[in-house]
Amino acid sequence: MQCPHCGYNGSKVVDSRPTDDGRVIRRRRECEHCGFRFTTFERVEVTPLLVVKKNGNREEFNREKLLKGIVRSAEKRPVSMDAITNLVDRVENKLRSLGENEVSSQQIGEYVMEDLANLDEIAYIRFASVYRQFKDMSVFYKELKEIMEKDKKKGQDHSGDK
């Protein structure tokens, strides 16, 4: 690390401590040439994740926007804020684990719906109605039917457990 005082390209770390809830490391350094002490901060460089919208536009992934959409779909439902936050965490982790700089809004929606279906069926239907842009009752009915069939299968799978 270059000394801001004399420009020498060598320093030693005198003290290190985490800051910003462990996301940043604050380091006190001392120049090996002139003894000047200075502070540096080290943080993980997160590359921005771009969302490709249906119309082809790109925008930076916005965790808060996703959170608000899920909160809206779970309004007046017995779903805790912790459960919703955990769902958003899982979706964001899945997206980042893809290793891509760009991800489609459809992929995000599918990840949310996978998780939301297991969390609360009504919140799932509400989210799906906006995400899939239900045009008429037949599409809505088809989605409901699929959920009911999944529930029926779950019930049959667990009936032999007793």
Image (tube, grey):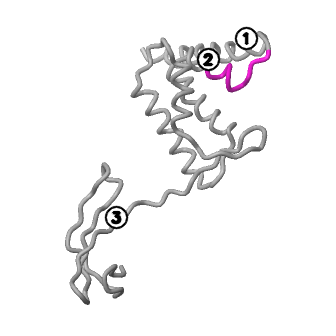
Which three-letter amino acid code belongs to the residue tagged 3? Phe
Reading the image, the residue beneath label 2 is: 126
The magenta segment is 127-135
Q: Is residue 112 left or right of residue 40?
A: right
For the residue pair 140 and 70, the one nearer the viewer reads as 70
For the residue pair 48 and 37, the one nearer the viewer reads as 37
Reading the image, the residue beneath label 1 is: 141
User: Which of pointers 2 and 3 indicates the residue nearer the eye?
Assistant: 3
Q: Is residue 17 above or below residue 140?
A: below
Which three-letter amino acid code belongs to the residue tagged 1? Tyr
Residue at 28% over, 82% down: 11
Estimate the x, y position of residue 16 in percent, counting from the top left. Answer: 24, 66
Q: CA distance from mark 1 to mark 2?
A: 13 Å
Q: Secondary structure at mark 2?
A: helix
Q: Secondary structure at mark 1?
A: helix
For the residue pair 118 and 107, the one nearer the viewer reads as 107
